[in-house]
Image: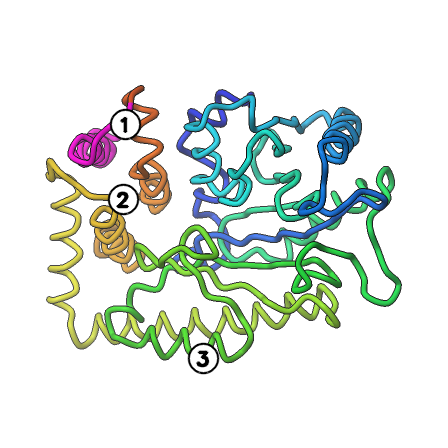
Amino acid sequence: MNLKEMIDSTRIKWMDNDGPENDIVISSRIRIARNLAGVSFFEKMNATDIETVFNTMQLVIAKFESMQLIRLDQLSNIERNILMEKHLISPDLLKNPEQKAVVLSDDQIISIMINEEDHLRLQCLLPGLQLYQAWKLINELDDLLEQKLEYAFSEQWGYLTSCPTNVGTGLRASVMLHLPALVMSKQIDIVTGVVSMMKLAIRGLYGEGSEAVGNLYQISNQITLGRTEEEILNSLIAIIKHLIEQEREARQALQQDKKHWLEDRVFRAYGMLKNARLLTADEAMKLISDVRLGVDLNIIPELAPAVLNELIIMTRPVYLIKQAQKELNSLERDVLRAELVRNKLVLGN
């Protein structure tokens, strides 16, 4: 898949909804931080250091047939933001694009962010609960790169990174969860409190600093030093499975105790998405969340969950601007957002 196809498409592998525990787990992500030995870390890099990292990675990636390196200053602001909204790059990579680049695999499962907070951020994103599988793919890529690159590494501390919280394995594992029943039953504050006490980070759709719109929560490890990759993954997966169990119990309770209220809420949301002429971004995400719950509980069996995952991207402001091929004011975005959602759900476009 070429770059234009990647940017134009609203579908990406993590949206396929074909992974384990896919009624609750939207996606799994593994990201590892690496730096090149002998090159200043990003905060201290000069123009020569930046070009050294670019040129080094260009030579290495040229040997990988299924990957391409793209300098961000060669993309428009809209194109860069679309990659971010698809979770292929982080919001931090958008800052100072003339210093940044990304390597993308043809299937968009793997990305390597260049000169974000570290020289390299290797990322794998898969649908459902597939942290072990994502780690396997990233570990294999890391081993291949380490045959050609010398990483900044300490026998005492492990992989050296710009932020001390990433020193050691450099591993951040995260899972995107859809937790509407815990929110509806007003248990989510207790859950998030317990998660935080267990030294895990809980964030919104786009990571650090973002809100949990559409009842979507990212849960990730915070500790990378003094633990092996397997220990980090095992601990996180155990907690994620507990959260899955709690969400399923909350869904069952809603079906038993508030069946008519739940079905009414789901069908009202479905009706609004299919008929609304104005939709704000937050309203769209809330309605998509309610309909997604209805699909997962077989209240609306005819709708594929992957369609709703795709709508998450289609309703974001940057995608709307790209579709319109011009800047839009708030009202124009709301009108176009409602039109795109209607066409997707009613016409199947």
Q: Which residue is mark 1?
A: 349
Instruction: Give left or right: position of 203 versus 319.
Output: right
List x then y, in percent, for residue 38.
Answer: 85, 44
Residue drawn where x is 66% and y is 46% of the image: 121
- Callout 1 secondary element: loop
Magenta-highlighted stretch: main secondary structure? helix
Q: Which residue is mark 2?
A: 303
Q: Nearer the viewer, residue 71 or 140?
A: 71
Quarter-wise, where is residue 255 in the image?
bottom left
Quadrant containing the N terminus in the rendered view: top right
Instruction: Give left or right: position of 335 versus 239.
Output: left
Residue drawn where x is 39% and y is 75% of the image: 246
- Looking at marks 2 and 3 on the same chain, the residue that comes earlier in the sequence is marked by 3
Quarter-wise, where is residue 54 in the image?
top right
List x then y, in percent, for residue 133.
Answer: 64, 53
Inter-mark Cα distance, 1 to 3: 42 Å
Density class for disc 1 (Cα within 10 Å; few <14, some 14-19, many ≥20) is few
Q: Which residue is mark 3?
A: 194
The three-letter amino acid code for the residue at tag 2 is: Leu
Quarter-wise, where is residue 289 in the image?
bottom left
Does the magenta segment cover residue 316? no
The three-letter amino acid code for the residue at tag 1 is: Asn
- Callout 2 secondary element: loop
The magenta-colored residue range is: 327-349
- Looking at marks 1 and 3 on the same chain, the residue that comes earlier in the sequence is marked by 3
Inter-mark Cα distance, 2 to 3: 34 Å
